Image (cartoon, rainbow, N blue to C red):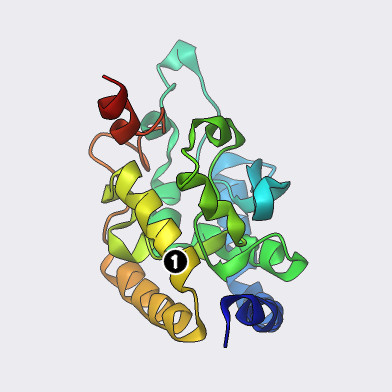
Amino acid sequence: MSRRSYDSVKRALDATTAGLGLVLSSPIQAVVAGAVAKSLGTPVLFRQERPGLDGKIFTLVKFRTMRDSDPAHHIVTDEDRLTRLGRVLRSTSLDELPTLWNVLKGDMSLVGPRPLLPAYLPLYSAQQARRHEVRPGITGLAQVSGRNLVSWDDRFDLDVDYVERRSLRLDLKILWATVRTVIVREGISADGEATMRPFTGSARLADESA
């Protein structure tokens, strides 16, 4: 099966799996929503614009894991803002459950390059920008290869590798590896960061232009 043909099959599988996942996870989501509301108040959902297929902007939804910035109390960085509950939700990926709505709607896929920030779009090299040739995923090849411990350049290499090799077999392999990664809680954050350092441009391009 060609990659283009697989994309159509994959979309059907994504919609079916996401719909079933939303139904089955609804009791868990209700409990998490209550815990977030008690810890952080409302809204319980975090919404942020992210670029998807072909760079088209969509609104990503997740459970909130961070308190609002409060410079007066020295709560400014992501690491400061991340709550104890938020750390648990992130380490278990329970904060990602509402993202199944994005998969059901067609904004995302179960497997693909993780959706990053719109501000990063002009910073990509032509090769790195190929990550937008497919729908972004809840999990991906980079996430099962070290999550947030992988450098940006290596992460983008893995993203493009996925674009070029995507198949049902690879997706199933990534999903299985994701379960293991969540269970052992590997690579949740880079050193000194709540998740990963912001992307400011490719280190390789900087080296080449020096």
Which residue sits at x=39%, y=81%? 173
Residue 142 percent location from the top left of the image: 37, 59
Residue 89 percent location from the top left of the image: 45, 57
Q: Secondary structure at mark 1?
A: helix
Can you name the residue that lies furthest to the top here? 72
Query: Looking at the image, is 139 positioned above or below residue 172?
Result: above
Which residue sits at x=32%, y=53%? 188
Can you name the residue that lies furthest to the right here? 105
Residue 48 appears left or right of 149: right
Q: Quadrant of residue 4?
A: bottom right
Query: Looking at the image, is 74 positioned above or below residue 54?
Result: above
Give the camera-side residue of 109 and 187.
109
Residue linked to disc 1:
162
**The C terminus lies in which quarter of the figure?**
top left
Give the camera-side residue of 81 and 167.
167
Can you name the residue that lies furthest to the front here? 209
Binning the other alpha carbons within 10 Å of mark 1 as few (below 14), some (14 to 19) or many (20 upward) gives many
Residue 173 appears left or right of 150: right
Residue 44 appearing in the image: no
Which residue sits at x=65%, y=81%? 5
Which amino acid is tagged 1? Tyr
Which residue sits at x=65%, y=66%? 30
Give the camera-side residue of 34 and 195.
195
Residue 113 appears left or right of 142: right
